[in-house]
Amino acid sequence: MFEFLNANSIYIVLLIALVVWGGIYFYLVRLDRRIRRAEELIKKELHHREK
């Protein structure tokens, strides 16, 4: 096992980096959706109050 990790250490680092970047990407996508919903809700509330 240690020999495999030692021989392929660059691939292990690459895999970890890809997992981290993938997690950041999905977090930002989810955050963007939540912000978009909040903006729409605020716009509806402001439009409703103007009437």
Image (tube, rainbow, N blue to C red):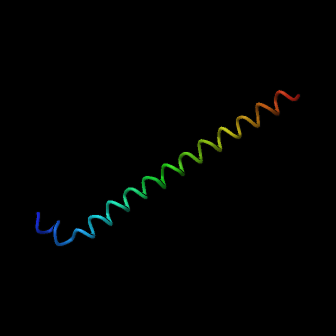
* Whole-percent x, y for residue 38 in the image: 65, 38
In which quadrant of the rendered image does the C terminus lie?
top right
Q: Nearer the viewer, residue 48 or 24?
A: 24
In which quadrant of the rendered image does the N terminus lie?
bottom left
- The residue that appears at 11% across and 68% down in the rendered structure is 3
* Whole-percent x, y for residue 25 in the image: 49, 55
- The residue that appears at 59% across and 48% down in the rendered structure is 32
Q: Is residue 26 above or below residue 48?
A: below
Residue at the far bottom in the pictured view: 7
Q: Is residue 42 left or right of residue 24?
A: right
Q: How many marks?
A: 0
* Whole-percent x, y for residue 22 in the image: 43, 57
Q: Is residue 4 left or right of residue 31?
A: left
- The residue that appears at 54% across and 51% down in the rendered structure is 29
Q: Nearer the viewer, residue 35 or 14?
A: 14
Q: Is residue 39 left or right of residue 23?
A: right
* Whole-percent x, y for residue 17 in the image: 36, 61
Give residue 10's quadrant in the image.
bottom left
Residue at the far right in the pictured view: 51
- The residue that appears at 32% across and 60% down in the rendered structure is 16
